[in-house]
Image (cartoon, rainbow, N blue to C red):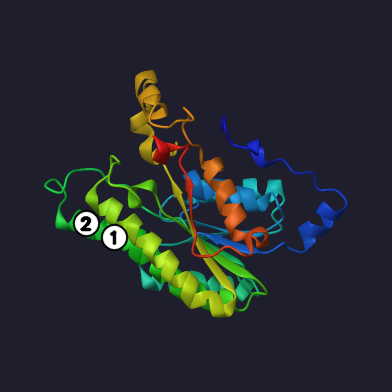
Amino acid sequence: MAVHAPVIGYTRLATGVEAEREEKPAGYVLVTGSSRGIGRAVVLRFASEGYAVAVTYHSRRDQALEVAERARRLGAPEAIVLQLDVSDPRSLEEAYRELESRWPHLNVLVNNAGVFHVGSIEETRLEDWEKVIRVNLTGVFLATKTFLPMLKKAPWASIVNIASIAGQTGNIAASAAYAASKAGVIGLTRRLAVELASYGIRVNAVAPSFVETDMVRSFLDTPEKRKKIEELHPLRMIIQPEDVAEAVYFLATPASRAITGHVLSVNAGRFTA
């Protein structure tokens, strides 16, 4: 359970106006890489506010089904499960056809799918570099390009890309490939914010520091390791997926209607250390 998340469990009572909202979605949201970790938390955050959600997975369908069921219990009027490889244009086209046949438009695209990589440049093989860039950066480009027609149909729409503190500073324990991919996401975010403004589509990014997910569990498997990570952050905490989900929700929804091209750092003060 998230210790620092502002909305633990995302509890919502379906009564009165809430019950009516279950029949008509607050909007339609697609989150790539949402069978676990940050993506899962983002899906549940939107579900708790009555959004229809699309949960995507690469290989663990069982995890995606669990997220979808949890989303329905929280109030999502619809929770679709899609197999998706963001680095494969054919996979994206199949997902697009499925969503287009079921939803009138897409309000929010959250480009979250990614892979983590550590190692020096001497240890990084070309195939490692190409895989990280293909998933983390090219995947954002391809997903945005693929789902843009559905975003353009919506009365309001936005894109939120999951970047990283590794794309903002070199003083992070991640490989050059990972840092380059996330720096690329930040640059892509800013350029798309300008390009898509004429359609009324906002594009922003969230740049987390170290987030407690399965992907980095080995960095936290002893009390000593946890303490070391906590001490990197002035707030002396380890960021939870729900903390990132709150930032995504704010940037994605009309509450931030005047914000585009922004990179919101969720780093527990690490930049100030």
Residue located 24% across and 47% down the image: 175
- The kind of residue on which mark 2 rests is Trp
- Work out whether 228 lies above or below 37: above
Between residues 266 and 122, which one lies in front from this camera angle? 266
- The C terminus sits in image quarter: top left
> Circle 1 sits on which residue?
133
Q: Are marks 1 and 2 in contact (CB under 8 Å)?
A: yes
On the question of residue 87 being in view, the answer is no
Residue 257 occupies quadrant: bottom right
> Circle 2 sits on which residue?
129
Q: Residues within 10 Å of mark 2 (few under 14, many from 20)?
A: some
Between residues 102 and 172, which one lies in front from this camera angle? 172
In x, y percent, where is residue 263? Answer: 47, 56
Secondary element type, mark 2:
helix
- Per the model, the C-alpha gap separating discs 1 and 2 is 6 Å
Residue located 57% across and 72% down the image: 201
Between residues 119 and 237, which one lies in front from this camera angle? 237
- The kind of residue on which mark 1 rests is Ile
Outermost residue on the top side: it is 223
